Image: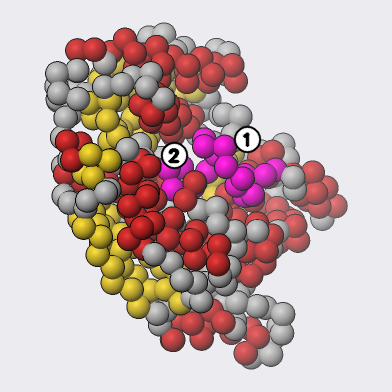
């Protein structure tokens, strides 16, 4: 029986992604000076205005308006005729310190306070549920629909910036529908939708350059990993409304954390609900989601199963997760034994995750576009490493 699955991505000029990038750029600027800084930074933007707000406790001295303007201009919003100009827009800030009630739980975990574990380190900065996922549909061990959407969105931005397609503008979205057969393997690209902001009057010129420079290279790369994949019979829709001249914050208000499904697995796997951007790694919304992905990817890379989903859950102020669940979707795996192996091979406390994945570095702005997982942008994302796959398999086999 045929089944279809669809995922979407957005370019760096999308209003919500502008906000994610600004929030993470502020975080990076703080971590450069103060790796222990506590940051929860939200951004919203609308016509002619950006508001940065949140709770920050740090020794760093940063210029938030300058950081925000640099991000906006680098995206490509550098003149008023695009509807938004980083040089002249208003930048408002409203920052406070981290709540002392939250800080007391983060500074020292409950396990340490009660004498259960003197080395527990930091407690979780909030309660929460985090999911990680991996599958063997792509070389990145990610679901095929979201990876194709991300790569097309990235190509869309690159062809704009390098002048290959000079009449497209920063805002844009991609959407890819993949047909699966009953065995769960992707068989055919069914539908591709690209909506890209463009200069007035240029819409009739979009079709050929988008197919040649954005769509075809991404599909050909996918077929190298899946030789049977049908990439020739898809339906294509480009700017289906017939016009996309007004875009960015002039068309839609943007907000940090409003593209969490784009940031993760494109709805192919659950998401716990917490956003990533603008949060330092003591916030398990971010760091534990990265570790959950790291675990799932190493489980699949070990050959124990074709797809794996990991759930972690934390209580505020506590170091150890309150639960760990692993789903291998019917593979011939003892999942209880696998949980024990994971517990032995991976650090699951907030401090342990931060140290294991080296998360106090200013690496976060590059995560804020084209997915935090799969590494489309070629960043140094430690959670994408599979260096523990062999150790995990050996540990599982000895239990």
Please rate how many residues cluster around mark 1, counting C-alpha atoms within 10 Å: few if below 14, some from 14 to 19, many from 20.
Answer: some
Please rate how many residues cluster around mark 2, counting C-alpha atoms within 10 Å: few if below 14, some from 14 to 19, many from 20.
Answer: many
Horizontal side of 267 relative to 53 (left or right) equals: right
Q: Is residue 332 above or below residue 290?
A: above
Q: Which mark is residue 370?
A: 2
Q: Is residue 155 above or below residue 170?
A: above
The residue at 67%/67% (across/down) is 352
The residue at 15%/23% (across/down) is 200
Q: Label 1 belongs to which residue?
A: 306
In the image, the segment drawn in magenta is: 367-386
Location of residue 324 in the rendering, given as x and y in whole percent from the top left corner: 59, 61
- Whether residue 127 is visible to the viewer of this picture, yes or no, is no
Q: Give the SS element for disc 2.
A: loop
Q: Is residue 355 above or below residue 25?
A: below
Location of residue 319 in the rendering, given as x and y in whole percent from the top left corner: 60, 75
> For residue 23, which quarter of the picture?
bottom left
Based on the picture, tell me whether residue 384 belongs to the magenta stretch. yes
Q: Which mark is residue 349?
A: none
Based on the picture, tell me whether residue 190 belongs to the magenta stretch. no
The furthest residue to the bottom? 114
Near-viewer residue (52 or 124): 52
Please name the predominant secondary structure of the magenta segment in the image. loop
Counting residues from the start of the chain, the first of labels 2 and 1 encountered is: 1
The furthest residue to the right? 398
The residue at 19%/17% (across/down) is 202
Q: Is residue 361 above or below residue 202?
A: below
Near-viewer residue (337 or 299): 299
Q: Give the SS element for disc 1.
A: loop
> For residue 329, which quarter of the picture?
top right
């Amino acid at each position: 029986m045929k089944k279809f699955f669809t995922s979407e991505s957005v370019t760096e000029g999308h209003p919500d992604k502008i906000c994610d990038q600004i929030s993470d750029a502020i975080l990076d600027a703080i971590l450069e000076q103060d790796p222990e800084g506590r940051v929860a930074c939200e951004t919203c933007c609308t016509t002619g205005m950006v508001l940065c707000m949140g709770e920050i406790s740090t020794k760093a001295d940063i210029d938030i308006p300058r950081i925000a303007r640099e991000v906006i201009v680098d995206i490509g919003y550098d003149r008023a005729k695009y509807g938004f100009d980083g040089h002249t827009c208003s930048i408002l800030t409203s920052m406070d310190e981290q709540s002392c009630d939250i800080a007391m739980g983060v500074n020292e975990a409950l396990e340490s306070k009660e004498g259960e574990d003197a080395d527990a380190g930091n407690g979780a900065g909030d309660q929460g549920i985090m999911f990680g996922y991996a599958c063997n549909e792509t070389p990145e061990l990610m679901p095929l629909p979201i990876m194709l959407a991300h790569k097309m969105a990235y190509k869309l931005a690159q062809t704009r910036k390098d002048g290959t397609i000079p009449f497209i503008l920063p805002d844009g979205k991609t959407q890819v529908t993949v047909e699966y057969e009953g065995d769960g393997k992707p068989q055919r690209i069914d539908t591709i939708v690209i909506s890209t902001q463009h200069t007035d009057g240029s819409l009739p010129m979009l079709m050929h350059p988008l197919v040649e420079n954005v769509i075809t290279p991404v599909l050909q790369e996918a077929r190298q990993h899946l030789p049977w994949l049908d990439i020739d019979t898809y339906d294509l829709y480009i700017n289906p409304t017939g016009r996309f001249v007004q875009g960015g914050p002039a068309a839609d208000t943007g907000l940090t954390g409003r593209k969490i499904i784009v940031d993760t697995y494109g709805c192919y796997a659950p998401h716990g609900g917490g956003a990533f951007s603008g949060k330092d790694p003591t916030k398990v919304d971010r760091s534990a989601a990265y570790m959950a992905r790291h675990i799932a990817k190493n489980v699949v890379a070990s050959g124990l199963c074709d797809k794996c989903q990991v759930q972690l859950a934390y209580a505020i102020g506590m170091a150890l997760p309150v639960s760990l669940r692993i789903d291998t979707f019917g593979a011939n795996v003892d999942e209880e034994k696998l949980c024990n192996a994971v517990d032995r091979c991976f650090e699951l406390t907030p401090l342990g995750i931060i140290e294991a994945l080296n998360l106090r570095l200013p690496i976060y702005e590059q995560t804020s576009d084209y997915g935090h997982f799969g590494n489309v942008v070629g960043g140094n994302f430690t959670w994408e490493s599979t260096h523990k796959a062999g150790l995990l398999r050996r540990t599982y086999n000895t239990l």
